[in-house]
Amino acid sequence: MRPIKTLIADDSAAFRQLLVKFLNSQKSIEVVGEAENGHEAVEKAAKLKPDLILMDIRMPRMNGLKAMNQINGLKNTKVIVLTAFDIQEYREAAQEAGASAFVTKKSMVNDLIPAIQEAFKES
């Protein structure tokens, strides 16, 4: 099975670097790009056609929820929200926007890989 091509969308360069290192340690995942805001995430998603986007919610220029609504037109691209804000309103909005999962950065080490596996279990 080929690796899951993944785009990381988060406004923190330090967090993106940490996440790239974490994901690159997984043989089933290949990071193909990074975006620092929602607008860039939409552009890179169209260009790179990733299998998965790890999307923060609070970002400049365009938040992750608005970006998700624009990205939903891409076939075969799943989105997992990865955010520091465990707010019920965000969970509901992410679900309505079509997110495959909602993972907090606090629980990322334990919950992210299982969420990715679950999102691609039927694929």
Image (cartoon, helix red, strand yellow):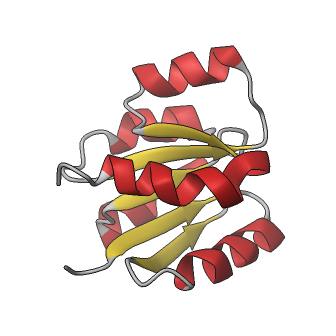
Residue 31, image x, y percentages: 48, 78
Residue 67, image x, y percentages: 49, 41
Q: How many marks?
A: 0
Above or below, 105 relative to 50? above
Residue found 67% across the figure and 16% down from its top: 88
Dividing the picture into quarters, in which one does residue 4 lie?
bottom left
Residue found 42% across the figure and 47% down from its top: 79
Left or right: residue 18 compared with residue 31: right
Above or below, 123 relative to 104? below
Between 120 and 57, the one nearer to me in the picture: 120
Residue found 77% across the figure and 33% down from its top: 85
Instruction: Name the quarter where the N terminus is drawn.
Output: bottom left
Left or right: residue 92 compared with residue 3: right
Between 114 and 36, the one nearer to me in the picture: 114
Dividing the picture into quarters, in which one does residue 10 lie?
bottom right
Residue 62 can be seen in this image? no
Residue 58, image x, y percentages: 73, 39
Between 51 and 35, the one nearer to me in the picture: 51
Residue 83, image x, y percentages: 70, 43
Residue 21 can be seen in this image? yes
Instruction: Name the quarter where the C terminus is drawn.
Output: bottom left
Dividing the picture into quarters, in which one does residue 68 lie?
top left
Left or right: residue 64 compared with residue 60: left
Above or below, 38 relative to 109? above
Left or right: residue 33 compared with residue 100: right
